[in-house]
Amino acid sequence: MILCLLLVSLGAGCVVQGEKADAPNTRNRSPQQAPTERSSLLFLEGRSLLRLDAASGRRTKLGAFPTPDVRASPGSTWIAYVVPGQPTSESHPDFLADPRLRLFDAGSGEEVALGRGFAPLWDPSGSRVAYLKSSPARSCDGEACTGGVSVRMAWPGTGRSETILDEGSYGLLGWAGDRLLVAVGSDTAHTLSVAPTGDELELPLAPSQFWGASPDGRWLVRVGTEQTVFVRLRGGRLTAETTPIALGGRLLAAGTWATDSSGVAAMALGGRTAPEVVLFSPEEPELRALPHSRGVSGAPLWSGDGDFLLFPRDSGGGGGTLNASLCPASVNPSQDRTGGCRSLLSWREGVVLLRMEQ
């Protein structure tokens, strides 16, 4: 086994089999109590994985990655990481001409070698991972490669893996519930939606318009030059039911859906303010600023229970120092000047926040 690591990313979503009533929006609730002393922050410092105990501030190093290409399952202890297929002269290469994909279960220590593979993308349930497998004929000149790829899916809990799209030109966009959304070659007008059964749907959605879809597969955010909207999905298909998102002259940058699909947290750019975290949902589509989030510099991450948001933020003190801010996921701030927010970590460079665990 190459490494033994624990890496957890965003909390698991719910895969819905059929239609349900819309989930109530709970993001205007009163601020929650601070996380318990059992909370910890997982983060990368360079290529080292560390856990920070929220109560004591104690750091524990859990391991180190051979490359920075790592993706964690949102709903299980499995992680996917890429290793060189051939020996390399670089100790920490940023680009691999012959990448191989491995899965590691941090709970049991089990490891699965999937062979050629890269760009892993876990589904919301965390039970399966999609990835691209390069053709044996793939060749690279510098960081530019030619040759087709196939799309494969693996179920690490069972050891099963299979090809779901034969060799072609593909890019993995994201998941909408249990359906994988794929960009196909030079087709700039459509997105391919693939079910675990192999059933394919061609959606009238340009890959460049896809911003993200809810974990339950019922809503998709479609961006455009004139309007950004929520689009209702039924049976994996786009419907005519849309809800305009009131951007207020701002742009949506990186963001994530809540694990219960009740809403979205994103970084908003532009306007008259510094970048800040905003909350919105199909039921409340106007952007509502999260208090004390100005200066955010990366995607906000939801806590597993959906009560808190974790995000990197400029400390405001100059010198390029960033803080890991943990704030209640509510637009109703508490009465104290911090709004219930805490700074868990400070750094200048080389840190990536992974998840707040509880």
Image: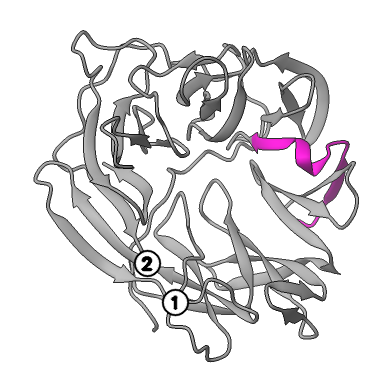
Query: Which one is nearer the viewer's eye here, 132 or 352?
Result: 352
Residue 115 at x, y = what percent? 61, 81
Q: How crowded is mark 2: few (under 14 residues within 10 Å), some or many (20 or more)?
A: some
- Tell me if residue 236 can be seen: no
Q: Quadrant of residue 186?
A: bottom right
Q: In this view, does 226 lie above or below 219?
A: above
| Residue hosting label 2 | 47
Image quarter of the N terminus: bottom left
Asked whether 210 falls inside the magenta stretch, the response is yes
- Queried whether the magenta region covers residue 146, the answer comes back as no
Alpha-carbon neighbours of circle 1 within 10 Å: few (<14), some, or many (≥20)?
few
* Secondary element at tag 2: loop
In 3D space, how far apart are the residues under numbered discs 1 and 2 (Cα atoms)?
9 Å
Residue 146: where, in percent of width, then height?
81, 75
- Residue extending furthest front? 319
Residue 206: image location, x then y, percent = 83, 39
Type of the residue with mark 1: His
Q: Is residue 266 left or right of residue 356?
A: right
- The residue at 53%/35% (across/down) is 255
Q: What stretch is highlighted in magenta?
A: 196-212
Please give the residue where the numbered disc 1 appears in the rendered image: 92
Amino acid carrying label 2: it is Arg
Q: Position of residue 322 (x, y in %)?
A: 31, 41
- Quarter of the picture holding the C terminus: top left
Q: Earlier in the sequence, mark 1 or mark 2?
A: 2
**Residue most toward the left?**
56
Check the image and report above or below for 215 versus 274: below
Q: How many labels does the image show?
A: 2
> Residue at the location (43% across, 43% down)?
11
**Residue at the spot 76% in from the left edge and 85% down from the top edge:** 136
